[in-house]
Image (spheres, rainbow, N blue to C red):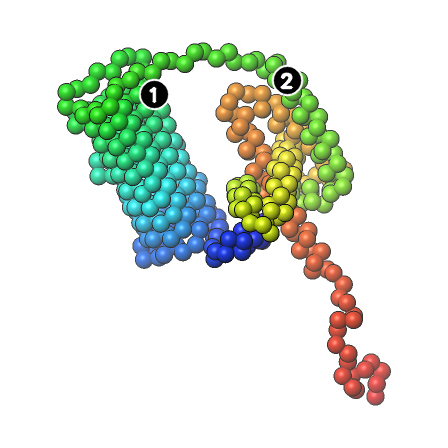
């Protein structure tokens, strides 16, 4: 899979005439704590128990922490960024704390809390339990927040959108502010350069010490939407289930070795397959998009899009095969002749889960598709490498023997 990603990057940058940037993947059972003097030069993907970056990162960071500190509010953050990041930041963990500088975008997902205490050069998107922007912190661009409790005391340069159970504002906002929350509090000294749009159960009354350059607008509650019952989408899901089952039958009949290899990868290297699937899910369409702007890259772009669509659909099938195996066999490896019953069970579980309300159905789809894509791509590349390594040598390409070295010569 890594070779496939590097090949796609090579096509992209050769077409654009730009240098190829390297990507590092690190999956650690323990912490990842590079020293303050260490410089991270490449794009970095990290899965570790805890992550603390104090030095400088010159490219994008994709961070995933597996540590959990329970619900204690005084527990330390599992991801801490106190250095300088020159690229984008994507981070997900139990708790996230930033105190350095992020020069581009930050996208953060923290289960317990997120504290954005540093400076962010562009936009911020964050989802978590409790979000806080201290008084000394700043975001130059737009802010999009969703969580339980949101406290903004710092400076936001662009537009602000907040969706939370409780919102407290006391900072400076350079653009319009939109707040959807049952409890909204504006402390004296708050300054908003644009309009303040809010949706709440109670009217919002502003203190005289609050500076609002625009208008105070209360948004009306949206009209109730009739939610369809499970039986409404059942015929469609049955049709999709039948199509996926037929496709899986053809795959297991024509390529049993690849399907077994992908099943083994998902069983033994699930998180690695998930990470590689996420890379393929994001990288292939990006590569195809840039290739389409070059004359010689248009055919490659079309081929990449076709391969991408096939990989996404078959990745779902590989994920369903793994789910069926997990439900029945758990730790054992099934025989090849039993792949189809396992596939049918996994697909039944998948399409039953897609009848659940949003966003559970989307999360289930990604949970099946992304690791399946990574496992399939890795299995295909392993099979191709085995074929190339076992190709017979061409005798015509070998140099003739030297005089006196002929077999049987005295």
User: Compared with residue 41, is residue 223 higher up or lower down, i.e. above or below?
Assistant: above
Write down the residue under mark 2.
Answer: 234
Write down the residue under mark 1.
Answer: 180
**322 with respect to 289 (left or right):** right
Residue found at the very far left of the displayed protein: 209
Q: Which disc, if any, is residue 199?
A: none
- Residue 190, quarter of picture: top left
Residue 60 point in image, percent of width and height:
41, 48
Residue 98 point in image, percent of width and height:
31, 42
**128 with respect to 138 (left or right):** right
Residue 152 point in image, percent of width and height:
26, 30
Residue found at the very far front of the displayed protein: 295
Residue in the foreground of this view, choosing between 378 and 265: 378
**52 with respect to 307 (left or right):** left
Which residue is depicted at the point 59% across and 15% down? Answer: 230
User: Compared with residue 326, is residue 50 higher up or lower down, i.e. above or below?
Assistant: below
Q: Is residue 72 visible?
A: no
User: Compared with residue 374, is residue 245 higher up or lower down, i.e. above or below?
Assistant: above
Which residue is depicted at the point 34% across and 41% down? Answer: 122
For the residue labelled by badge 2, is the local secondary structure a helix, a strand or a loop?
Answer: helix
For the residue labelled by badge 1, is the local secondary structure a helix, a strand or a loop?
Answer: strand
The image shows a total of numbered marks equal to 2
Residue found at the very far right of the displayed protein: 408
User: Disc 1 or 2, which lies upstream in sequence?
Assistant: 1
């Amino acid at each position: 899979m890594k070779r496939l990603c590097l090949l796609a990057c090579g096509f992209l940058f050769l077409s654009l005439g730009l240098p190829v940037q390297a990507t590092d993947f690190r999956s650690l059972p323990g912490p990842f704590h590079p020293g303050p003097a260490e410089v991270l030069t490449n794009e970095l993907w990290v899965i570790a128990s805890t992550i603390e970056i104090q030095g400088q990162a010159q490219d994008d960071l994709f961070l995933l922490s597996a540590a959990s500190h329970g619900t204690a509010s005084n527990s330390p953050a599992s991801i801490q960024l106190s250095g300088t990041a020159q690229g984008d930041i994507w981070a997900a963990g139990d708790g996230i704390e930033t105190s350095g500088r992020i020069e581009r975008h930050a996208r953060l997902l923290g289960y317990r809390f997120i504290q954005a205490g540093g400076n962010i050069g562009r936009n911020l998107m964050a989802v978590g339990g409790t979000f806080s922007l201290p008084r000394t912190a700043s975001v130059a661009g737009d802010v999009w927040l969703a969580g339980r409790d949101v406290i903004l005391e710092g400076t936001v340069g662009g537009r602000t959108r907040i969706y939370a159970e409780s919102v407290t504002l006391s900072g400076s906002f350079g653009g319009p502010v939109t707040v959807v929350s049952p409890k909204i509090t504006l402390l004296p000294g708050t300054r908003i350069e644009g309009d303040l749009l809010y949706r709440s159960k109670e009217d919002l009354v502003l203190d005289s010490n609050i500076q609002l350059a625009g208008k105070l607008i209360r948004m009306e509650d949206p009209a109730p939407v009739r939610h369809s019952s499970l039986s409404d989408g059942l015929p469609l899901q049955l049709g999709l289930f039948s199509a996926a089952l037929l496709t899986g039958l053809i795959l297991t009949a024509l390529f049993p070795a690849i399907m077994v290899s992908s099943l083994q990868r998902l069983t033994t290297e699930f998180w690695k397959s998930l990470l590689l699937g996420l890379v393929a899910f994001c990288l292939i369409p990006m590569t195809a998009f840039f290739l389409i702007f070059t004359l010689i890259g248009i055919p490659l772009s079309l081929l990449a899009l076709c391969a991408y669509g096939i990989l996404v659909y078959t990745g779902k099938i590989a994920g369903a095969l793994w789910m069926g195996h997990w439900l029945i066999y758990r730790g054992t490896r099934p025989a090849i002749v039993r792949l189809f019953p396992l596939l049918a069970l996994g697909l039944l579980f998948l399409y039953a889960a897609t009848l659940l309300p949003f966003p559970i159905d989307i999360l289930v789809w990604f949970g099946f598709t992304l690791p399946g894509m990574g496992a399939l791509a890795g299995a295909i590349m392993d099979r191709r490498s085995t074929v190339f390594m076992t190709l017979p040598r061409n005798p015509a390409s070998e140099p003739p023997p030297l005089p006196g070295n002929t077999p049987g010569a005295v």
